[in-house]
Image (cartoon, coloured by chain):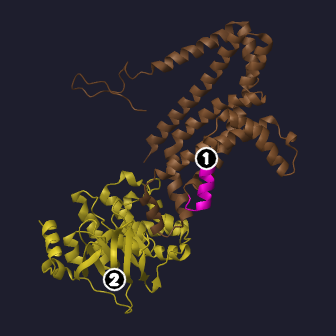
Chain colours: A yellow, B brown
Amino acid sequence: MSTKLATTNQPMISINNISKFFGDFRALDNVSLTVDRGEVLMIVGPSGSGKSTLLRCINHLEVPDAGNIIIDGKQVTPKERELNAIRAEVGMVFQRFELFPHLTVLENICLAQQKVRNSSRSESEKVARGLLEKVGIPEQANKYPPKLSGGQQQRVAIARSLAMQPKVILFDEPTSALDPEMINEVLDVMLTLAREGMTMVVVSHEMGFARKAAHQVVFMDGGTIVEQGTPDQVFGAPQHERTKLFLSRILH
Amino acid sequence: MAVDLPPSTSLQPPTNKRFNWRTFPWWLVAIGLIIAYMGYRIIDDPEYTSIFEAILTGLGTTLMVTGISFICALILGLVLGLGRVSRNVILRNLSIGYIEFIRGVPILVLIFTISFAIVPALSNGLGLNASNVSLTVRAIIALVLIYAAYIAEIFRAGIESISRGQMEAARSLGLTHAQAMRYVILPQAFRNVLPALGNDLIAILKDSSLVSVLGVREITQVSRLSVSSSFKYEETYFILTAFYLTMTLVLSLLLQWLQRKMSSNVH
């Protein structure tokens, strides 16, 4: 469907031999993965498979116990100053939106522009209004997030991460907390981003989105990558028993 | 405040306007009547009037001690509360140690200890003469040091009441930990803890009576001095009680009103 924007050969994200423990539980076991520029990568798998942990390791919301992550040539480190600079370039969209309820929609989108990028109030508001237009809810600018529907809130959350002009956006189950009739309005925005060449890592079970937008699908189980390939390969002709079993359960 | 609705006997939706004897604040009427009766006696009875006027001379001190102590305790309490949830081991342990120390000793004892042991020791350490520090100032220092510990715990609870996802969202945008605290966590936490802070304001007002043991001429001390020469125990202490009751009631109604206004403003 969409074309990859290959400006250089260097991958946008390379994840090298990542392991992560929670106590004795091995959430990630020596996982390696690369995401090219403009690529949409979908991560699927049962709950507890480590897919969210892997996503959260990319911007170090979870600090991996072993291995390293390189984003656009820069290694992600736990050092505050460097990490903040990297995080500013890596957007993240959460399952539960996590908009700031005490700020208006507009202020939500402006906060990081002003405090991290030092952009002026008028400049950041201009950007914010443009992005609200893009996600289709310009009329909600002065409302507070709790007044919005789930789908609208998630679109604001996407606009908020876009405001930082990120190189990558990480989506952590962006439609799981939504009522069914609101899922498509969020997926449509994500599809637009994918077509525009945004590099995206998406943890989700939305098969429709995967078939339309994903370049690569990764199936995880037990903290490892079991299978990876194009959507047609992984969904159409899964090689592993665990993948088949999982797909048979979510596809009914 | 939770309102118990009566079991509905008909299919009519319950209306707010109809008088409801179950939810009517009878207690408020009772306390109001007591205060009104005292007011009547103060106006009617010259003996009551003169005692009232004597106690009134301490009101300014009570309000000043309460107000200054509360504002300073809020600031110190916020600092301690932030230290309490800090990731820095030293800061966190210093804060917890201080809070637990204060909360483990009775307030009356702390007032003596701070006024007559800690303030003189600190003054000597700073090369100052402790006798220059008035007892009113010592009383305020004591109340601030004590209530900061209690308020710190309120702030800690408020900060911890904000979901982890809020901090993660802020950090994922590139904000520093301090920026995330200031612009995302604290504004929400502050709103959540306003009722608890209001309770502590009322508590400081009441506990300001304890500094009468230092001889600070607030309303309790003024009453005790008045009684020691007039021997009118009943009149004096009834009036003193009415003073506190009126102030706490007014404050508590004011806080409830403020809270209702804020929650109706919530977006």
Residue B92 part of the magenta segment:
yes
Q: Is residue A165 above or below residue B232?
A: below
Q: Chain of mark 1?
A: B
Residues in magenta, as a range: B86-97
Q: Which mark is residue B124?
A: none
Q: Chain of mark 2?
A: A
Outermost residue toward the front? A24
The secondary structure that most of the magenta stretch takes on is helix
Note whether residue A214 is visible.
no
Q: Quadrant of the N terminus of chain A?
A: bottom left
| Quarter of the image where one finds residue A182 | bottom left
- Pinpoint residue A3: horizontal percent, then vertical percent: 28, 86
Q: Which residue is more in the foreground, B249 or B219? A: B219
Q: Three-letter amino acid code at disc 2?
A: Ser
Q: Which residue is more in the foreground, A142 or A242? A: A242
- Pinpoint residue A229: horizontal percent, then vertical percent: 22, 83
Q: Is residue B132 above or below residue A106?
A: above
- Pinpoint residue B113: horizontal percent, then vertical percent: 74, 38
| Quarter of the image where one finds residue A198 | bottom left
Q: Three-letter amino acid code at disc 1?
A: Ile
Residue A207 part of the magenta segment:
no
Q: Which mark is residue B99?
A: 1
- Pinpoint residue A104: horizontal percent, then vertical percent: 45, 56
Residue at figure coordinates x 42%, y 66% from the top left: A160
